[in-house]
Image: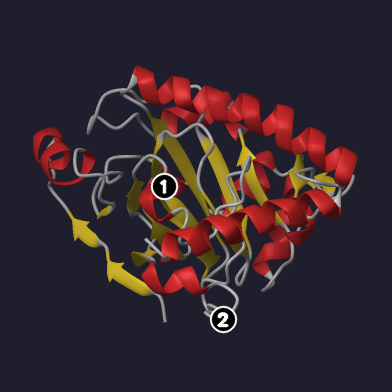
């Protein structure tokens, strides 16, 4: 099995202790009390969103999201929010909602939560919501803009497996993307031998908790229950912001363009490069 460490669960962290123990050391942590004062912690339920915002049309995505071809990185469908919520309540569901800025459609929701005071540099224009049914998974990736991520869990539980940026080669990072296609739960060491050198973190985030994922950390997510969360992003470094903008430009200009031109052959080429880099790293 992969070498995975537990993630600290902390309450009462001050900005100073958080910076010293986690931010500056780029170490994940679960806050058990960061959202205690937010009305959203108890107000936001599946029934609440169905009743008050159920008529919104929302994009939903299946596992085909990252497959080569015309549908690469596009939604499978657009359906009423209420219909989607009813779907994931019933049990395992293929569709997820992610990177959806519900607050543009319902700005009154912004009064139900706050920008944390735990560090500077929060990007208030991009709080995103993520919804999924029990058993839904999010493939291993890192966030393209290189912000720190604060994942606030409002309903259900999520398992999150993380790897720090320096493990990118060992987990077979596909060039020009933010993706890795290793099997986190059943790693194939014959196919991906560099995984023997990889290490990371494993945790479960419960309702009312916030997971801090440092900039560039890879993460794989499993919905242990039907649930939803809100991610808040922070970036206190202008250098890191510039690198994030470069990543975004490279992704849209190179990866999407080559996918349209080459389709599955482009995916195979990226896979070959990832394997070559990992093999070279094994020999170091």
Q: In terms of secondary structure, where does tag 2 sit? A: loop
Mark 1 lies on residue: 151
Tell me the distance, in whole angstroms, between the alpha carbons under discs 1 and 2.
34 Å
Residue drawn 21% across the image and 61% down it: 8
- Residue 225 rendering spot, x and y as whole percentages: 54, 70
Left or right: where does residue 31 sit relative to residue 263? left
Q: For residue 268, which quarter of the picture? A: bottom right
Crowding near the residue tagged with mark 2, few <14, some 14–19, many ≥20 C-alpha atoms within 10 Å? few
Disc number placed over residue 190 in the picture, else none: 2
Residue 98 image position (x, y, % from top left) = 63, 46
* Left or right: 133 as drawn, with respect to 38: right
Give the residue displayed 55% in from the left and 72% down from the top: 192
Instruction: Using the rendered image of the protein, determine whether residue 100 is visible from the camera's viewpoint.
Output: yes
Look at 16% across and 37% down and name the residue there.
Answer: 19
Task: Classify mark 1: helix, strand or loop.
Answer: strand
**Where, by quadrant of the figure, is residue 40 drawn?**
top left
């Amino acid at each position: 099995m992969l070498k995975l460490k537990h993630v600290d669960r902390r309450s009462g962290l001050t900005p100073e202790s958080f910076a010293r123990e986690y931010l500056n050391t780029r170490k994940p942590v679960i806050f058990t009390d960061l959202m205690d004062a937010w009305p959203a912690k108890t107000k936001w339920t599946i029934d609440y969103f169905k009743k008050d915002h159920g008529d919104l049309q929302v994009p939903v995505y299946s596992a085909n999201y990252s497959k080569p071809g015309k549908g690469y990185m596009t939604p499978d469908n657009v359906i009423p929010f209420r219909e989607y919520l009813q779907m994931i309540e019933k049990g395992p569901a293929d569709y997820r909602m992610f990177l959806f800025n519900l607050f543009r459609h319902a700005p009154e929701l912004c009064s139900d939560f706050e920008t944390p005071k735990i560090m500077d540099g929060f990007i208030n224009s991009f709080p995103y919501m993520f919804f999924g049914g029990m058993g839904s998974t999010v493939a291993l990736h890192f966030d393209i803009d290189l912000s720190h991520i604060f994942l606030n869990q409002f309903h259900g539980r999520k398992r999150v497996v993380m790897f720090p940026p320096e493990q990118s080669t060992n987990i077979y990072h596909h060039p020009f993307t933010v993706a890795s296609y290793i099997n986190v739960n059943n790693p194939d060491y014959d196919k991906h031998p560099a995984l023997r050198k990889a290490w990371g973190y494993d945790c479960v985030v419960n309702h009312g908790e916030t997971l801090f994922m440092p900039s560039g950390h890879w993460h794989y997510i499993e919905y242990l229950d039907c649930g939803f969360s809100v991610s808040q992003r922070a970036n206190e470094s202008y250098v890191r912001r510039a690198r994030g903008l470069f990543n975004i430009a490279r992704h849209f200009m190179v990866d999407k363009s080559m996918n349209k031109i080459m389709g599955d052959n482009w995916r195979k080429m990226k896979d070959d490069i990832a394997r070559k880099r990992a093999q070279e790293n094994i020999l170091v």
